[in-house]
Amino acid sequence: MEMKKVTTKSMPYEAWKDNEYIEKLVTELQESGANVVVGALDNLINWGRSNSIWPLTFATSCCGIEFVSLGAARFDMARFGWEVARSSPRQADFIMVAGTIVNRMAPVLRRLYDQLAEPKYVISCGSCAISGGPFRKSYHVARGIEDIIPVDVYVPGCPPRPEAMIYGIMQLSRKMKVERFFGGVNRKEDRKKYLAEHPIEDC
Amino acid sequence: MAELQEKISKRFPGATFEEGETLLINIADSSLHDLVKALRDEHGFDYLVTIVGFDRTTALGCVYYLASTKTQRLVSVSAQTTDRDNPMLHSIADLYRVAGLYEREVYDFYGIVFIGNPDMRRLFLNIDWVGYPLRKDYDSNPELNPVSIENERQSDTTTEWVEMPDGKVEKREHTIFEEDEFVINIGPQHPATHGVLRFRTSVDGETIKKIDVYMGYIHRGVEKLCEDLGYMQTLHFMDRLDYFSAHNYHHGLCLCIEKAAGIEVPERARVARVMMDELSRIASHCLFLGTFCMDLGATTMLFYTLRVREQILDIMERTCGARMTFNYDCIGGVIADLHEDFVKDVKELLAVIPKNLKEYNKLFTGNVIAQNRLNGVGVLTREDAISYGVTGPSGRASGWACDVRKTHPYSGYDKLDFKEIVRTEGDSMARFKNRIDEIEQSAHILEQLVDNIPSGEWLAKVPKVLKLPVGHWFQMVEGCRGVFGVYIESDGGTKPYRLKLATPSLPAAGVVDHITRGQKIADLITIGGSLDYIVPDMDR
């Protein structure tokens, strides 16, 4: 069977910089044997899902301002169906961690993630969210957010240009396209394991 | 200054004086309060610029920078204690309203307790935080203070240390909110707080009774990080404090270091810096107009104002190579010459600004909803603005002429013709209008400079590893949100011994409680938005 060429927003498949990653994901899915009927339904639902990804309005510092620029007329993320920035995590699909996460913010970020409805995604945006960035040596900065919440896409930069953010969200949309919506979005297992390791306290 | 020194030495025989760029008065802790009171009441030093905590290993203490709003003179007062286990100083929180906040910051960083401060809690760090991070012997082992996903422990009480008549100090607990008060939590993740800031708001119906501002959600410890870096390396943090005044903050730190090292900046670099400052002021105010109107429900404004901002970012990108973290000003000048199209681009920008301002006014300022929501909301009087240290366009909206470009001119601002916009209403509308008018003035400054950029070098010869002589320096510049002060203390090495950044957003957040009391909770968004604080700038 030929490899499915996953792309989005009429971008040619060859123009993507990191196809190995998505090919690996597709191979894994094919090996686990997707049912044909469900596969077609999956495609339909994923087509809808991947074209209207709603972000949570979440910004701690500089990267958030670039996210504002992304929403304005010049970069216009409304072209892609991402413009519906929600203020409540319960209505959002993904959280774009734009900015430094410090010790005091970590439990808040974790709670926001817990409040997102499934299926949920995380984009780690900017060097602070990825590794602590220029503040890595500080006494009050988390060295990357993957210790706090699982991450789907990393967007490097300090801050990333709006174009880089567009590329990052498009990658997320591509990832959504290969997921099996029925029978569990493929991260569910990991997530269960993750939650077992990091139990949610009563609040 | 000699006259002041004479008067003080007569009244406080224990005081010693150090002449420098500003007069430094060393005083024993017991007379600190009386001295500051005398300076305020008899000599007109009514504005507390900042409190700089320090740890000189043998002693812990503070330097207080005071300024007079009439004569614009600066004076500094220093008090210290040698007790490292239980360091205590007397509070001046009853003299300046902003001092309470600054003392909390010093307590958080150095553990110095201020006797008489009614709210002695940590400001940025958790109450369970081990150690005081800016002390020189701080143990930065992350295992002591790990990043945790457990909710932090919170206390509803605060502590006050009270001095008894017999000289003993007694600890007292106060509750922040009464038991039957209804407290709403706004933030830290709330679209109208402009970042991660938290207000614990006590309400009576819809009326605000009290707000406890809870910060530290983006405290990144920049001041401590700077102590381990060379002077050149500290510069890039300035981009990331108030990311809208990146150029202005760079300018401030560079001026302070250049003053200390005695470096002369070439004329071309000086003009380039001023032009970049004014461009970023326009960009910053444009973004303010957009987000502020968006907070009030007028989303359309954002698209109009960001159009001008993008045009400015293009100009900066051509010269500096980045959209936000420019890192353009450096010690001795600027890192790169202005782009060949710079003059043409700025002229194009200046041509569209009047048209755009007209459009903004038509779209929003005259709107009846905007008028009703802004006029008379969140009034800050001139006295309170000074006492709370609210500077920038917000302070000037209260009738306080506090523009550093006029009061302590730097980089040739004294030779430029521009008006300081001062309004006397002190309400949200005045703060809003001030920013629109400042865009006009910044454009006027650019008009004067754009055809007169001197040619020649843009970077002076500076040693690769810069050493500053022993001493301390203080420099103020006008950021987009108010007075930005830099204090550098050097022990003669290649790294700053202490680098304090006095930012305008911290006092702006400190005044929220005062001006929202008695207002409706819906107006909190208006007032917070009109003060235009930036949270990373506040937390550092």
Image (cartoon, rainbow, N blue to C red):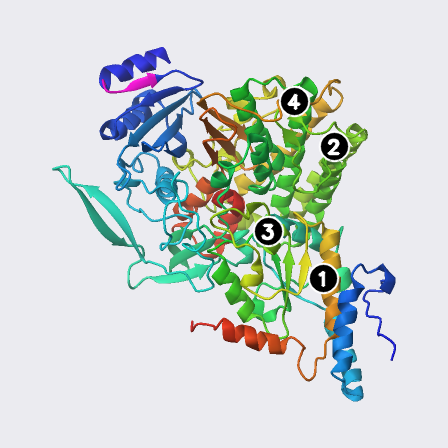
Identity of the amino acid at label 1? Answer: Ile
Same subunit under labels 2 and 3? no
> For numbered disc 3, what is the local secondary structure?
helix
Identity of the amino acid at label 4? Answer: Arg
B125, B517: nearer the viewer: B125
* Disc 4 target residue: B270
Same subunit under labels 3 and 1? yes
A60, B130: nearer the viewer: B130
Q: Residues within 10 Å of mark 3 (few under 14, many from 20)?
A: many
* Disc 3 target residue: A128
> For numbered disc 2, what is the local secondary structure?
helix
Does residue A1 appear in this view? yes
Using the numbered discs, state the Cα–Cα distance from disc 2 to disc 4 in whole angstroms.
21 Å
Tell me which chain the residue with mark 3 is part of: A
B514, B31: nearer the viewer: B31
Q: Which residues are magenta?
A: B13-17
What number is the disc on residue B350? 2
Residue at 63% over, 29% down:
B330
Q: Nearer the viewer, mark 1 or mark 2?
A: 1
Using the numbered discs, state the Cα–Cα distance from disc 1 to disc 4 in whole angstroms.
41 Å
Using the numbered discs, state the Cα–Cα distance from disc 4 to disc 3 in whole angstroms.
32 Å
Which comes sooner in the sequence, label 2 or label 4? 4
**For this view, does A27 lie left or right of residue A131?**
right
Q: Nearer the viewer, mark 2 or mark 4?
A: 4
Tell me which chain the residue with mark 2 is part of: B
Same subunit under labels 4 and 3? no
Looking at the image, do the residues carrying marks 1 and 2 touch, with CB atoms under 8 Å apart? no
Using the numbered discs, state the Cα–Cα distance from disc 3 to disc 1 in whole angstroms.
18 Å
